[in-house]
Image (cartoon, rainbow, N blue to C red):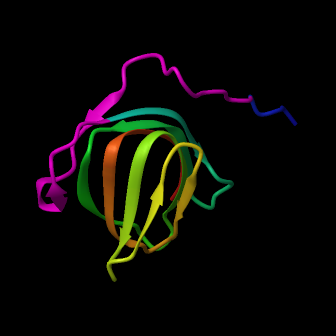
Amino acid sequence: MSAQPLLSFGLPVSGAPELSHSKPERLLRGNPLRETWNALDAPLNGAGELSSGVWRCEPGQWRIAFGPTEQEIFTVLEGCCRLHREDGSFEQAGPGQAIRIPPGFTGSFEVIERMTKVYVIIK
């Protein structure tokens, strides 16, 4: 059995990021530029896929909807964000804090001040 390679990533990031904006129908405030440095896409022993990397975004807010098996955990490295539930409550995170977004979550993601996070998404 061969050993899986270890992967190390973080700040500062190198290389060109993938650039994106939210779909217009999801925007609630602003039109923030999102930069993604995806470091890993790997199958999970036939039970989905894992993606991980570094993500940076300008202030703004947009609706999000996770699929029934999709989930994310992220840790904020710089800046501040809020994850809003449909009932109006929210979780806020700043540097060194983490949030888990559970499968099936619907609500909105708000970047309060330019933020950078390390993320792990399981689909």
Give x and y (percent) for residue 75: 56, 47
Q: Main secondary structure of the magenta part?
A: loop
Give yes or no for residue 120 being in the magenta stretch.
no
Vertical position of residue 47 compared to residue 5: above or below: below
- Would you say 83 lies left or right of 42 here? left
Q: Nearest the camera: 99 or 94?
A: 94
Q: Residue furthest top?
A: 15
Q: Is residue 43 left or right of residue 57?
A: right
Residue shown at 33% from the left, 43% from the top: 113
The image position of residue 122, as x and y in percent, is 55, 56
Residue at point 38%, 76% (across, down): 89
The residue lying at 45 percent from left, 60 percent from top is 92
Q: Quadrant of residue 1?
A: top right
**Part of the protein shown in magenta:** 6-34
How many numbered discs, if any?
0
Percent across and percent down for residue 16 are 37, 19
Answer with left or right where residue 62 lies relative to residue 70: left
Q: Front-most of 58 and 33?
A: 58
In-image side of 95 versus 15 (left or right)? right
Q: Is residue 73 above or below residue 17?
A: below
Nearer to the camera, 98 or 79? 79
Furthest residue in direction left, as rendered: 24
Instruction: Measuring from the top left, give residue 117's x and y in whole percent.
Output: 48, 41
In the rendered view, tell whether residue 103 sits above or below residue 13: below
